[in-house]
Amino acid sequence: MGFSLKLQYCLVSVMVLLPAVCYSQDYFVKSRATYYGSPDCLGTPSGACGFGEYGRSVNDANVAGVSRLYKNGTGCGACYQVRCTNPQICADNGVNIVVTDYGEGDNTDFILSPRAYARMARPDTGAHLFAYGVVDVEYQRIPCQYSGYKTQVKVHEHSKYPNYLAIVVLYQAGKSEILSVDIWQEDCKEWIGMRRAYGAVFDMANPPSGDISLRFQVRGSAGLTWVQAPNVIPKYWKAGVAYETDIQLY
């Protein structure tokens, strides 16, 4: 992610409360934001969340890398409303972004795609906003909405049939966070946990043969729940293919 990728990879009561605060956040938090270089103003397909091309173009390329909000990958796919605070050049509503990457800047919470950064500006003030480089912003967590799309489970391109399976969830709606993923082991009649490889990517060596059922531990509006996706991945799965599910995340 431009210069951000070069930088990437107090209390006890506050630390305990932070996950709940970040999830249930219905108010604006003050912070700072910047942007990264991109020849086409879109996102990057090599983001730390592991989304690939989806991370480049999802949400009309209004995407961002985050640092504190990354949460070891749990924050991947989250949506935020981000608006800069200079009333002379900043639009009232700012921009709604999807987290697709990790990145650290100059005391910033967001490193935005150029397209997302530009959409914080009022008409004809984009050049002034870019001239600042880093701007004061305020942000809040919002539900992700993907009209016309169901939640998908994509077999990651690094998967190798049939001995290594890696997956990533796409079009994750609502304010949900996927904490863990289990895979059903039919011969043992039990759920086996997949490893969070990095970002939003979960993997397993020697996965079960046959159709694959998954379950997701989700933190959302209903609290901490398990959501099952029976037979979501076919027996002869292919790397790079995304499979639709019927699961609902809120």
Image (cartoon, rainbow, N blue to C red):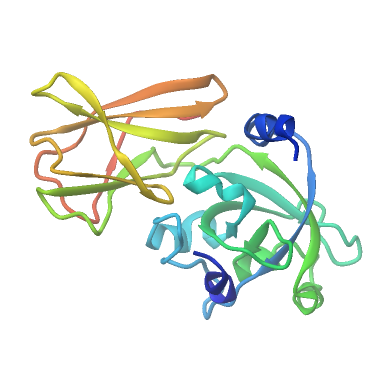
Which residue is found at the position 76% from the left and 69% from the top?
Answer: 134
Q: Is residue 247 above or below residue 194?
A: above
Residue 82's spot in the image, x, y percent? 72, 52
Decide which of 94, 194 is in the foreground and name it.
194
Decide which of 73, 60 is in the foreground and name it.
73
Residue 76 in view here: no
Residue 83 in view here: yes
Residue 103's spot in the image, x, y percent? 58, 63
Residue 84's spot in the image, x, y percent? 80, 59
Which residue is found at the position 15% from the left and 55% from the top?
Answer: 160
Residue 93's spot in the image, x, y percent? 77, 51
Q: Quadrant of residue 181?
A: top left
In the image: residue 80, left or right of residue 239:
right
Residue occupying the far right of the picture: 88
Q: Is residue 107 above or below residue 5?
A: above
In the image: residue 250, left or right of residue 116:
left
Q: Quadrant of residue 62?
A: bottom right
Which residue is found at the position 54% from the left and 20% from the top?
Answer: 223
